[in-house]
Amino acid sequence: MTRFVPHQSSFDFAKKLDKFQAIALIISTVFAILHVVLSNISSKEIPNIKCYDDIANGFSTFFSIVFITLDIIVNYKFYKAEIERRKDLIDHAFDKNYTGGKSTGYFNAQGVPIGVYKLAVQSFENSLYTSEVAKRMTLRKWIVAIIITAIFVLSACIGDKFFVNTVLQLGATGVFILQAIKLQLFSSKMNDIHSDFKKLFTDLKDGSDKTLKEGEMILYVLNYETTLSWASILTDSKIFDELNIQILPTKWGEMKRDYRI
């Protein structure tokens, strides 16, 4: 089946902006390191070293502003892309066409009757993918956050600079730390939601009337969607592609058999 995802272009655009944001942070960090180095060189050794130091500090501050600005834009673009994804979710679950063209090869819930149960199945699959990707993203995010924080704090404590420069540079660091904290909480919450879905579908394995569990199904779907909306975290494409090719489709197929979906 040819894969077609109508909302993919919106997520791809948000991810491009996210890459530019990462580049801005890297450049700002490089100039912060340069500022630390130049601050420890005497003007006797290199004439006009203070001027070079100020330039490095200025560039670090500028790209800190770029990083913070792009963070706001990325969050908004993610929000818009999520609206399109939710429309596609409803299209498949209830056989509608709010997107103007349903995705193909995106959900693996063929043969499941339309309705709230199918909505829960699709969200169950989504929670598996999201929780697994988030787990792998968390450690790397924290490692980078600790390194960058150490560099910017050191830069802020060395040399003469305007107060606003220090605030903006540490502000960019604060945004990145908050991203790491949010990703940690997001990963933990997604794991809990996925566990809730597993418990739900364990209860449904005995063939009991699924309509009696529709309230619980909707609750877990809403928990998943509100957590995504709150976190506004773009999953790492490289990690997703690696898992999507090697691990998760097989794991989801096994889960469907185990839970008699």
Image (spheres, grey):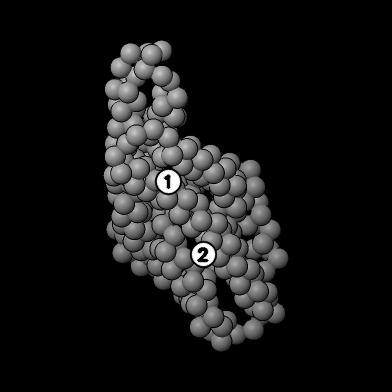
Instruction: Judge left or right: residue 181 versus residue 31.
Output: right
Q: Examine the image and state in which quarter residue 189 appears.
A: bottom right
Assign a secondary structure to mark 2. Answer: helix
| Quadrant of the image containing the C terminus | bottom right
Q: Position of residue 110 (x, y in %)?
A: 53, 61
Q: CA distance from mark 1 to mark 2?
A: 37 Å
Identity of the residue drawn at 58% across and 62% down:
188
Instruction: Look at discs 1 and 2 and give the one toward the viewer.
Output: 1
Q: How many neighbours does mark 1 have within 10 angstroms: few (below 14), some (14-19), or many (20 or more)?
A: many
Q: For the residue marked with disc 1, what is the amino acid?
A: Thr
Left or right of 208? Residue 127 is left
Q: Position of residue 183 (x, y in %)?
A: 51, 55
Among numbered discs 1 and 2, the one appearing first in the sequence: 2
Please give the label number shown on residue 64.
none
* Mark 2 surroundings: few (<14), some (14-19) or many (≥20) residues within 10 A: many
Q: Residue at x 41, y 71 (%)?
A: 94
The answer to which of 87 and 231 lies nearer the viewer is: 231
> Is the Cβ of the residue at disc 1 closer than 8 Å to that at disc 2?
no
Q: Position of residue 40 (x, y in %)?
A: 45, 24
Residue at 43%, 20% (x, y): give it: 41
* Residue 18 showing in the rendered view: yes
Q: Residue at x 31, y 55 (%)?
A: 76
Q: Which residue is mark 2?
A: 122
Q: Provide the residue designation for mark 1.
A: 173
- Residue 109 seen anywhere in this rendered image of the structure: no
Q: Residue 61's image quarter?
A: top left
Q: Is residue 133 above or below residue 31?
A: below
Q: Please state which amino acid type lies under the numbered disc 2.
A: Gln
